[in-house]
Image: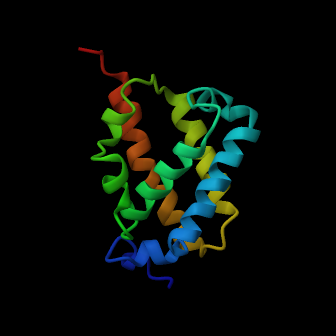
Amino acid sequence: MTDTSLYGFSDNSFQAAGGLDGIRKLVDDFYQAMDSRQDAAIIRAMHKEDLTESRDKLTLFLSGWLGGPRNYHEKYGNINIPRSHAHLRIGENERDAWLICMQSAIAKQNYSPEFSRYLIEQLSIPAERIFATSRKPLA
């Protein structure tokens, strides 16, 4: 599949990501990057030492977000991405570190170049929303 207009419809993105197993591998590579990259230490410190729950949450979220099974809600309830991260102060460094880890993880997957670009562009949207929300004064 090279027509990027097909991504984002039905389960096309979910399938391009390799289904649930592919997303799980992406998430594992993402957290491996977070654990090993010096420039990601700032965001690694925001997580519990045991990343089991974080891995599960991100896997289930991405599954539904990419058009696959929407199991996040069943297990963890509703999610509002900016609100779920409101307790964290996300600046440019944190946003960029998250995106760098995700880019590193995407590069390790067997994705087409078109899907890789599409995915990081789409993931940049919630990353930017979290950053913008975090910059607002707390009420």
- Residue 21 vs 27, above or below: the answer is below
Number of numbered discs overlaid on the protein picture? 0
Q: Is there any visible trace of residue 134 in the rendered image?
A: yes
Foreground pick, 58 / 138: 58
Q: Is there any visible trace of residue 122 in the rendered image?
A: no
Q: At 31% across and 33% down in the image, what residue appears?
A: 83
Q: At 50% across and 74% down in the image, what residue appears?
A: 19
- Residue 5 vs 23, above or below: the answer is below
- In this picture, residue 34 sits left or right of residue 136: right
- In this picture, residue 131 sits left or right of residue 17: left
Q: Position of residue 39 (x, y in %)?
A: 70, 33
- Residue 85 vs 73, above or below: the answer is above
Q: At 61% across and 73% down in the image, what residue appears?
A: 111
Q: Position of residue 17 (x, y in %)?
A: 53, 71
Q: Quadrant of residue 14?
A: bottom left
Q: Position of residue 69 (x, y in %)?
A: 37, 69
